[in-house]
Image (cartoon, helix red, strand yellow):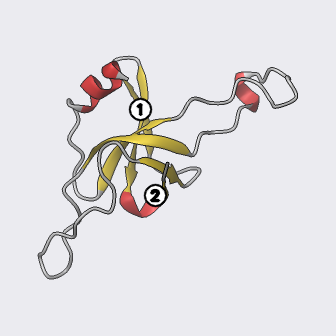
Amino acid sequence: MAKATATATKLRPLGDRVVVKPSAREEMTKSGIVLPDTAKEKPQEGTILSAGPGRINEDGKREPMDVKKGDKVLYAKYAGTEFKIDGDDLLIVSQKDILAIVEG
């Protein structure tokens, strides 16, 4: 994760966006069947590497973010923009596409 953290320091998301490192995809089913890349489920869980300062509302005031760096989150299945930087697969997601914070 040290490499992903170094990558995140290069990115400063704007507004209410966050940079997420998606969790690894399942390589095998519970019954032991190995899954090819085309059959793997798209991950919907990841760790926030960096977060923007928050959205500016109609009054010109900045709304605070509900999430922060290090939070493990669930996000909408097809949310955000995927990209690769320094060999890491990352995702930039708007806070509204984050469904929940995973606790524990």
Q: What is the number of the mark on residue 98?
A: 2
On screen, residue 30 versus residue 25, left or right, reads: right
In the rendered image, the residue lying farthest to the bottom is 59
Residue at image x 54%, y 44%?
45
Q: Secondary structure at mark 1?
A: strand
The x and y percentages for residue 86 are 33, 18
- Crowding at dot 1, Cα within 10 Å, few <14 / some 14-19 / many 20+, comes out as few
Instruction: Report the front residue among 97 and 82.
Output: 97
Instruction: Report the front residue among 104 and 61.
Output: 104
Quarter of the N terminus within the rendering: top left
Residue at image x 52%, y 52%?
74
Residue at image x 27%, y 62%?
65
Mark pair 1, 2: CA separation: 18 Å
Q: Say what amino acid the circle numbered 1 marks.
A: Phe
Residue at image x 85%, y 23%?
32
Q: What is the number of the mark on residue 83?
A: 1
- Crowding at dot 2, Cα within 10 Å, few <14 / some 14-19 / many 20+, comes out as many
Q: Is residue 20 above or below residue 3?
A: below
Q: What is the number of the mark on residue 72?
A: none
Q: Secondary structure at mark 2?
A: strand
The x and y percentages for residue 33 are 85, 23
Which of the 4 quarters of the picture holds residue 85? Answer: top left
On screen, residue 21 versus residue 17, left or right, reads: right
Q: Say what amino acid the circle numbered 2 marks.
A: Ile
Which of the 4 quarters of the picture holds residue 94? Answer: bottom left
Comes first in the chain, label 1 or label 2: 1
Q: Is residue 31 above or below residue 56?
A: above
